[in-house]
Amino acid sequence: MKLNSLQILRFFAALLVVVMHATQAISLRFTGVDIHWGLGGYGVDIFFVISGFVMVLAAPPVSSARVIRCRDAVEFFRRRFIRVVPLYWFYSLLKIAAVFIFPALALRSVFDPMHVLMSFGFVPWKSPWGLLEPILPVGWTLNFEMFFYFIFAIAIFFGVKRIAFIFCVFLFIFVLNNIFPENDVLAFYARTILFEFVFGMGIAIFYLSGKRVHPIFAVSAVVAGLVLLFFANWPVDMERLISGGLGAGLLVFGMVFLDWIFKNKIFESISILGDASYSIYLSHGFVLPVVAILMIKIGFSSIGCASVFSTIAAVVLGVVAYKFIELPLVRWSKLLLSEMKFPDNLIVKNMWRSNFRYIYIACPWTPNGGGMFKVADYLTQCQHPESKLRPDLAEMRPLDTRGGGSALASMAYLLIALVKLIQGRLGGRLAGVHVNMAERLSLFRKAVVVVFARTLGLPVVLHLHAAQLHHFYRNLPMLLKFLVRWSFSLANEVVVLGAAARAFVQDELRVPSDRVSIVINGVPQPSVDRRDALAPGAKLQLLFLGNLSERKGVSDLISAISKSQVAKLDNFEAIFAGKGDIEGYTAKAKEQGVDKVISFVGWADQKKAATLMANADVLVLPSYDEGLPLVILEALANSAAVICTPVGEIPNELQDGRDAIFVQPGDINGLANAIDSILGNPALRKKLEQGGRALYERKYSLDMFADSIALVHQRCFGVASRTVSLLQ
């Protein structure tokens, strides 16, 4: 599909660049001062928008077959390579030769081997004169073009929505540039001019939709584009996407829908100027210095007339170069690269030879991940032992998105995780991604994973564990709220812990009810035999297991122990296990006079936690915010009595007086009374132990939890890590 209007616009864009460089070359040669028409640089913006438009029209339709997508991606890039690279290499070699043969014509005559190599490879590299530009200076735009073609080819290969994929990749470049600001390559690409390709793609998608625009609106768009480009008087520091991209986009939009005006022999005959625009663009840098020197030699002094004459000369010689250099070079390149195709059977054999699939479980895969890590770890422990050997199952694999270091160091883990998603998508074996999300930074890290996975065309299950997300979300600015809602909307299914979380996800995050599922956490059977609490010398043991923080009510619990009557008995002890401000809470216990009965034992791994739980008479968790804590479920499994606050999903799952004793957050006296009533009343303690264990067996076993997750995976990914017979 050839649009005469775009051909004329391509020539117009090339002409703008030529005029800018003509005024520069003439002024430098005539006066030694760089005085040029800077608005001519907007020709590049027009080129980029046109390029985005044309690529959508030239690209093959999306195929469901991977082999066909691979073939289409290779063929797409092969065609773009033939169209762009040989002529650019020709003029780059010509530039090197010209500098050696006619050094007086060149403003810069210094070469660096690495810079030359990177120029031919379309990699931005600092030149010997200190600029990020290739040997052929106008080639800086081709670095953007080739990068765009490469990302477009990847989008074809993945079979994803191309405009969304490319937009996200471009956005990710900006994120990386903020993380690594010293990287020259990232700094080069992190420019808003990149998004002009997306503008063009959007115009093409609208054009292909079959909708038409009234001529008045099309003419208005052309006029508005020209005004924005050449008469808007933008500030010097205005973003290029606004000053150039917006006007270029309107201009291309209007011209596309005015193409019917140019459907006649006159415009068709002059469309050769559009065909020759690439040759004009690459060759004019050779013509202008020669014309300027000739003008000086014949005594011509008018800068304006010289600029006009040199522009005409550059256009004419550019058309000649198109006829006698570009066209033959393209023909020869097609012949040389005609065999650069991958046989379908080779692709199938080498890239998709295995039917065995896997599912990534994304979360912090260290103990720093807290409950999320434990849930993910439990899931992987209970998958079918042959999940990685049978084609009807999928192995669950860890995908660490944070690591165990600082928040800044976590970005490296996030980048590695994104690379693994690409590898999984390329390999064709990654069935889906199960993303475990909490609040604060976890929310934003996992949102990146969700967006990236969906952009790659991977199905996503979003598993929400956050106890405080509703508070955190409500305090976010409007833009971040929108981005959070958008990331949740991308998930194939959102898994929540209970009714309260479901209401928040549906009402505030606006996820449709048919894509929200409640899956209650589960924990394994106790691995350590329970101690005999009635044995001689046995102590009454209170256990706190979790992060030592105010949100968990640690200060409240220390104060409650100081008020407890049972805590004054010789056979009472309280164990606080977890990471946090151990030194500060130890000082608080000493201040309250209970440092003799409280022991802070630090972080407890799964084995140590199981031993502590088996020895505990009562688990106390006086939190101000929770989801459905695993530690409570583990206490129920171990037949330990529970004292907790009715927050989050707890009151929806446990019944006060039957499964646990509830105390309101911050009620220190009530907490002390609850401790005394359980540890001082063996009958009540026995009742809670039996009721809790019965509830665990009914609802919270690990097999039940794993089966529920497997059903979600089966719905979203088409495969799960457990056999269908187990699900039935």
Image (cartoon, rainbow, N blue to C red):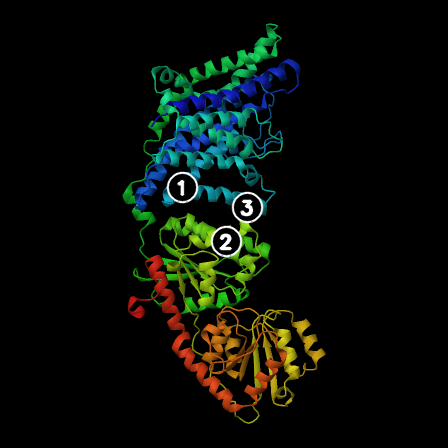
Reading the image, the residue beneath label 1 is 162
Q: Circles 3 and 1: CB distance less than 8 Å?
A: no
User: Which three-letter amino acid code belongs to the residue tagged 3?
Assistant: Leu
Q: Is residue 588 visible?
A: yes
> Which class describes the residues within 10 Å of circle 1: few (<14), some (14-19), or many (20+)?
many
Q: Secondary structure at mark 2?
A: helix
* Picture layout, residue 129 above or below residue 310: below
At which x and y percent is residue 520? 42, 69
- Left or right position of 727 against 401: left
Reading the image, the residue beneath label 3 is 176
Outermost residue, top direction? 298
At which x and y percent is residue 449? 47, 53
User: Which three-letter amino acid code belongs to the residue tagged 2?
Assistant: Val
Q: Earlier in the sequence, mark 3 or mark 2?
A: 3
- The residue located at (59%, 86%) in the rendering is 676
- Left or right position of 725 against 213: left
Quadrant (top left/top right/bottom left/bottom right) for the N terminus: top left
At which x and y percent is residue 575? 59, 80
Task: Give the CA separation, mark 3 to mark 2.
Answer: 20 Å
Q: Quadrant of residue 38?
A: top right
Task: Give the CA separation, mark 3 to mark 1.
Answer: 21 Å
User: Which three-letter amino acid code belongs to the residue tagged 1?
Assistant: Arg
- The residue located at (41%, 82%) in the rendering is 694
Which label lies toward us, 3 or 1?
A: 1
Reading the image, the residue beneath label 2 is 484
Which label lies toward us, 3 or 2?
A: 2
Outermost residue, right direction? 591
Q: Earlier in the sequence, mark 2 or mark 1?
A: 1
At which x and y percent is residue 39? 56, 24
- Depth check: 228 or 487 in front? 228
